[in-house]
Amino acid sequence: MNKIGMNERVEALKAEAAAALEKAETTQQLEDVRVRFLGKKSELAKLRKGIGALDKAERPAVGKLLTELQRSLAGGIETRLEEIGRQERARQLQNETIDITLPGRAPSFGSEHPISQTARRMIDIFQSLGFETVEGPEIDTEYYNFDALNTPAHHPARDMHDTFYIDCGGKPYLLRTHCSPMQVRYMEQHRPPLRIVVPGRVYRRDADPTHSPMFHQLEGLAVGEGVRFSDLKGVLALFAQEMFGAETRVRFRPSYFPFTEPSAEVDFSCSFCDRDESCRVCKGTGWLEILGAGMVDPEVFKAVEYDAERYTGFAFGMGIDRIAMLKYGIPDVRILFQNDMRFLTQF
């Protein structure tokens, strides 16, 4: 093949490549064109191999011509690739258009746990009665959990508070069994008059459908001059009505607690029935045992250096979990701690 024949083949190849580029409509088709005309086995590669058969005088001109063809083809492919890319993006935008007039999908933020809802409602009620909310440590000493509350080591009432002890270098630390230690801590740092409620987690070695090793309590304390048992009854009666409804009644039964004297168990009238014998909540009695309460024992005042002749006070404590169970009709306390979304999404 001479130079003239080579020129004719180059022109024919250029025209063929231009037609192939024009027909290519996708990036894959364009890649096929590139392999066909610029690949190792392409017609252009064959023409390059044929340069050696030409006269020496013709070789430079033909080599230059083939290089220009290669650059022209590569440039054409690049230009066509940009065009096809713009066309594909335009089609994609058209096919994936978002209708901004449609209502958005609201994200799911979950809901407040029933125990948290109940605790917040209880705190709001007592705050409306002038009680300040305070919190204390969940790991405390025997002194604050027992001794300062008139429950020394030999006292049989400690058997009711079987808890978890912690080895801290020989010091008697434990997971608190009630929120009452914070009452002592608060009285050590404040002088009467005072009104506080203490919500928080407490721990005892109990585990059954109505008891959990960890549960939540809210305890209250009011101290001042002339504080009477009738004040305690009025506060708890108002709380019961605000929590369970205006028709709720309150009943006090004599009881015993080491840190109050006199002491009482406090029942609320059942909000699920009217003395119905088939009621599974109150067992047909019409009453629900809710909390313990009483007047602060003078021995507790002695531990915090309050004048028991001048000051009197009352204290009470109730389980937040139990209030939640009664308010929402939950049959098993363990459901509250299983993180079952089918249950939690109902609140």
Image: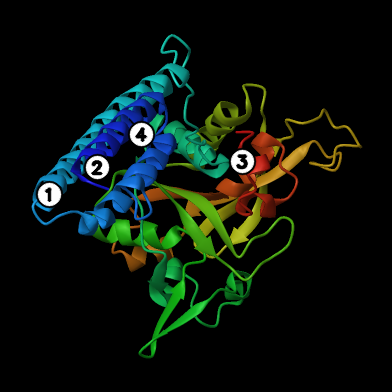
Residue occupying the point 77% across, 31% down: 272
Q: Residue at x 29, y 38 (%)?
A: 9
Three-letter residue code for mark 4: Gly
Mark 1 or mark 3, which is nearer the start of the sequence? 1
* Quadrant of the rendering where the C terminus is positioned: top right
Q: Which residue bears the numbered disc 3?
A: 344
How far apart are labels 1 and 2 at the CA level?
A: 10 Å
- Judge the density around disc 2: few (<14), some (14-19), many (≥20) Cα neighbours within 10 Å: some
Badge 1 local density, few (<14 within 10 Å), some, or many (20+)? some
Q: Residue at x 36, y 26 (%)?
A: 19
Callouts 1 and 2 close, C-beta under 8 Å:
yes
Q: Secondary structure at mark 4?
A: loop
**Residue 161 at x, y percent in the picture:** 58, 70
- Amino acid type assigned to the residue bearing label 3 in the image: Leu
Q: Residue at x 73, y 50 (%)?
A: 332
Which amino acid lies under the numbered mark 1 shown in the image of this protein?
Answer: Glu
| In the foreground, 192 or 169 | 169
Circle 4: is it few (<14), some (14-19), or many (20+) Cα within 10 Å? few
Q: Nearer the viewer, mark 1 or mark 4?
A: 1
Q: Secondary structure at mark 2?
A: helix
The amino acid marked with disc number 2 is Met
Name the residue tied to disc 2: 6
Are the residues at dot 2 and dot 3 in contact (C-beta closer than 8 Å)? Answer: no
Q: Which residue is mark 1?
A: 58
Name the front one of labels 2 and 3. Answer: 2
CA distance for labels 4 and 2: 105 Å
Left or right position of 129 against 56 = right
